[in-house]
Image (spheres, helix red, strand yellow):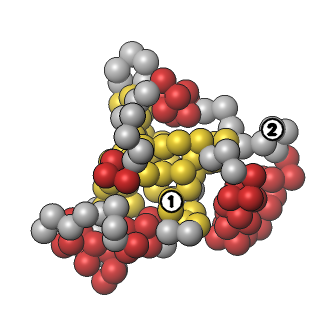
Amino acid sequence: MKLGFSMLLIVLAVALGADPARADDVWSAFDATDTIEITTQDDDGETRETPIWIVVVDAAGYIRTNDSTWLANIRRGSEVKIRAGEVELDVQAEEEEDAEVYDRVEEAFKEKYGWMQRLMSRFRTTRPTVLRLLPPSAAPAE
């Protein structure tokens, strides 16, 4: 698999112990990819890998879904990983409640995914759930 220069730098930084929560380049690698993989655990313990779209807004990763099994897994407390090529990151996903941020994320999806996103939006019957991704070291203490 061919890695771009920025992706190669990220892989090297993570391998050398860099804190991915502080590296904007980590989000850049995910934002530069059209489709990433999200990994969660189903209620029976099976691993679920799902291709999804991602955007970066204000140096944070955002994903969204309607009524999906992987969202149910996250709500149940499943561990979450995302992968773009060779870059994999453990994250926590929290539902975005801020309406202004939600709207900016929706616009970012329209900008990144163009006509496909606009077409899908026309047929959507429910408002999607937007999730902000937090690397473990950036997650709020419980």
What residue does disc 2 label? 126
Q: Is residue 119 left or right of residue 16?
A: right
Residue 120's place in the image compared with 39, above or below, is below
Residue 82 visible? The answer is: no
Q: Is residue 140 left or right of residue 130?
A: left
**Viewer-side residue, 54 vs 98:** 98
Q: Quadrant of the N terminus?
A: bottom left
Disc sitting over residue 91 in the figure: none
Badge 2: residue crowd in 10 Å (few <14, some 14–19, many ≥20): few
What residue does disc 1 label? 61
Q: Amino acid at mark 2?
A: Thr
Element type at marker 1? strand
Mark 1 or mark 2, which is nearer the start of the sequence?
A: 1
Q: Amino acid at mark 1?
A: Gly
Q: Quadrant of residue 41?
A: top left
Q: Quadrant of residue 140?
A: top left
Q: Residue at x 48, y 24 (%)?
A: 76
Count of marks overlaid on the render: 2
Residue 105 horizontal/vertical position (percent) = 67, 60
Q: Quadrant of the C terminus?
A: top left
Q: Which residue of the protein is positioned furthest toward the bottom in this rendering?
A: 5
Residue 36 visible? The answer is: yes
Q: Residue at x 43, y 51 (%)?
A: 134
**Viewer-side residue, 119 vs 134:** 134
Q: Marks 2 and 1, Cα distance to the nearest angstrom?
A: 22 Å
Element type at marker 2? loop
Point out the frontmost of discs 2 and 1: 1
Residue 44's place in the image compared with 121, above or below, is above
